[in-house]
Amino acid sequence: MTLSKTQRDQISNLLKEQIRRKLSDYSPESNNMPFHVRLLGQDRMALFSFIQSINTTLGTSVFEQVAAMIAMPHFKHAINQYKDFNNTISDKAQAAIQHIIDDLRAARAKPDKPAEIAEILRVAQTGTLKKIKRPRIDLFLESEDGTEYYFDLKTAKPNVDEIVGFKRKMLEWVAIRGAINPKPKIYTGLAIPYNPYEPQPYDRWTFQGMFDLSNEIKVAEEFWDFLGGKNTYEELLQIFEDVGIELRPEIDAKFATFAPKR
């Protein structure tokens, strides 16, 4: 198996801890939805609300922690919620980023991340350096050859305006790192933990024209197998399924309390 017993246990325990905490803290939302309740039942509405809460937790916390657990044996450093990151950027680099984005939006250029990185790093230590809000890095990795990977994890299907914002963020991370090290070996990109379009291929067309798809986006198997090796994604799905089966009686018992009394 790709994942060690220790890794499998770590991931399983994290999931159980998160689900049980949610169950113990859970109370139905106070929003009055009388038509929904009468149509579907209070127990189903309560379960729907719980599932939404779990979905948020997976996207904002669990996936990045699991990613760090999986990557740790394969990288020199693997840190989720990475905070040791500078927040200084050059005005020349900001201008270069704006130029790149303007050209991409106007279709005057095609996405080319290596060329974009080179353009930003050429000016990352020139002009006026200024402080900006410290970035939030979901997952930081450093390989044995010194390559630095900075990932932003996304589960939602983004709209066009969000995609432009994501692109700017990826380029700003390059500029911020370049303000300290003029020649970093750096990768910045989006990680999408699962394919919401499965069994169809991930619908990447929304990113086309703005993102260099092969150099900036890793989806589902591509992401997890990059972190832990071949078949990591399938093993991870099995862990989630096993935990779900184990916790099903606890979940069912919790939401049975919301069922109508007969």
Image (cartoon, grey):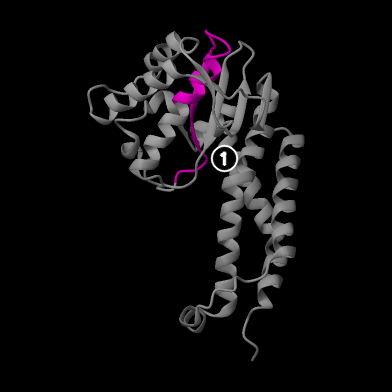
Residue 175, x across and y down, in percent: 49, 19
Image point (23%, 29%), residue name: 106
Q: Residues within 10 Å of mark 1 (few under 14, many from 20)?
A: some
**In front here: 95 or 13?**
95
Residue 224, x across and y down, in percent: 56, 33
Image point (58%, 61%), residue name: 51
Relative to 106, 210 lies left or right? right
What's the amino acid at mark 1? Glu
Image point (48%, 13%), residue name: 124
Where does the N terminus fall, quadrant-wise? top right
In the rendered view, would you say 3 is above or below 179?
A: below
Give the SS element for disc 1: helix
Tell me which segment is drawn in magenta. Answer: 171-195
Task: Find disc 1 in the rendering and name its residue.
Answer: 234
Image point (59%, 28%), residue name: 227
**191 magenta-colored:** yes
Residue 102, x across and y down, in percent: 29, 27
**28 magenta-colored:** no
Residue 161, picture quadrant: top left
Relative to 206, 19 lies left or right? right
Residue 44, picture quadrant: bottom right
Q: Is residue 1 visible?
A: no
Where does the C terminus fall, quadrant-wise? bottom right
In the rendered view, would you say 183 is above or below 25?
A: above
**In front here: 238 or 32?**
32
Residue 233, x across and y down, in percent: 56, 37
Q: Is residue 77 visible?
A: yes
In the rendered view, would you say 163 is above or below 143?
A: below
